[in-house]
Image (cartoon, rainbow, N blue to C red):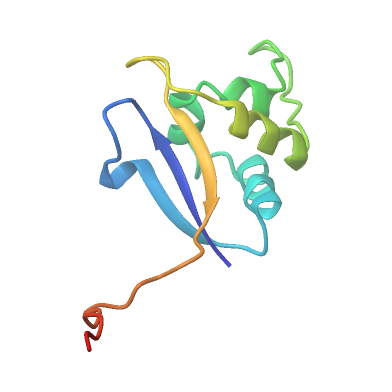
Amino acid sequence: MLFLVTCVYDEGVYAESFRVVEAPSRLAVAQHIVDCPDIWNRFLHDAHLYDPIIRGNMPYYVDPCPVTAAEALRLIDRSSVDGDSRARMSIHPITEILTLPLSEPQTD
């Protein structure tokens, strides 16, 4: 299954603000985010989720304590845009892919 992972500000979507990933579930995507934070570093920092998800809100001088994939998914789903200072991160399943050109509807 394909998923669209986005991290957008209130201005909209840019080429670098989304990724399409293939995974069995949203939870699997969240697990990858927890397991491989370097790949998701920009998204996590822009959404102010790096510390809550990867560090477990631990101070910088203490070893990180990542949350579970389920908790990471909950935090991602609760993220929100705050003007220009915080982006909203989300994981959406891609349910339809259109192949172009589309045929025009038949009229009788």
Q: Which quarter of the figure has residue 24?
A: bottom right
Residue 11's place in the image compared with 22, above or below, is above
For the C terminus, give its image quadrant. bottom left
* Furthest-front residue in this view: 108
Of the pair 106 and 24, the residue shown nearer to us: 106
For the N terminus, give its image quadrant. bottom right
* Furthest-bottom residue in this view: 108
Please report the residue visible at 31 percent of the width from the left and 44 percent of the height from the top. Answer: 16
Q: For this view, does 25 lie left or right of residue 93?
A: right
Q: For this view, does 75 lie left or right of residue 49?
A: right
Q: For this view, does 84 lie left or right of residue 37?
A: left
Of the pair 97 and 55, the residue shown nearer to us: 97
Q: For this view, does 51 lie left or right of residue 84?
A: right
Please report the residue visible at 67 percent of the width from the left and 38 percent of the height from the top. Answer: 73
Residue 61 pos. (x, y %)? 67, 12
Residue 79 pos. (x, y %)? 55, 26
Residue 75 pos. (x, y %)? 65, 29
Please report the residue visible at 42 percent of the width from the left and 52 percent of the height from the top. Answer: 19
Please report the residue visible at 57 percent of the width from the left and 25 percent of the height from the top. Answer: 49
Count of marks placed on residues: 0
